Image: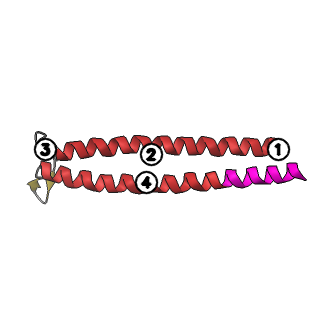
Amino acid sequence: MAKEKAKKVWELLSKITYRLGQNERAHSDIEFLEEWTQNENVYITFHADGWQGGEVCPDLLTSDFVDIAKKSIEVICKRINQRNVEALRDAREIQEMLTEVEEEANE
């Protein structure tokens, strides 16, 4: 029984570590996107290379990139929050398991 709980704690800790690592990378992505959107020396054009309604698709300009980056940051933040909630849930489960083990040891 104790071996199973120890294995479960290890699995939960691994999940927490992975999620927090993902969040760290996500924060780096946000910083990168924010730097690009605030740098006036960056000029970006997306080429569509296609047809839409019989006409060549227009290129997207830097202002479009800024809008896309802002929406991307919103999505990244939502994912960060989701991973934080999941990590907290796993931490609480670990806490409950450790409390159970402590109570069993005191009996």
Q: Nearer the viewer, residue 18 or 105?
A: 105
Viewer-nearest of labels 4 and 2?
A: 2
What residue is rendered at 63% in x and 43% in y? Answer: 13
Q: Are marks 3 and 1 in contact (CB under 8 Å)?
A: no
What residue is rendered at 45% in x and 56% in y? Answer: 81
Residue 14 percent coordinates (x, y): 61, 40
The image's mark for residue 23 is 2
Q: Disc 3 or 2, which lies upstream in sequence?
A: 2
Viewer-nearest of labels 1 and 4?
A: 1
Q: Are marks 4 and 2 in contact (CB under 8 Å)?
A: no
The quadrant in which residue 35 appears is: top left
Q: Which residues are magenta?
A: 93-107
Q: Is residue 94 visible?
A: yes
The image's mark for residue 45 is 3
Q: Nearer the viewer, residue 72 or 54?
A: 72
Q: Secondary structure at mark 1?
A: helix
Q: Secondary structure at mark 3?
A: loop
The image's mark for residue 2 is 1
Q: Residues within 10 Å of mark 2 (few under 14, many from 20)?
A: many
Residue 76 percent coordinates (x, y): 37, 52
Viewer-nearest of labels 3 and 1?
A: 1
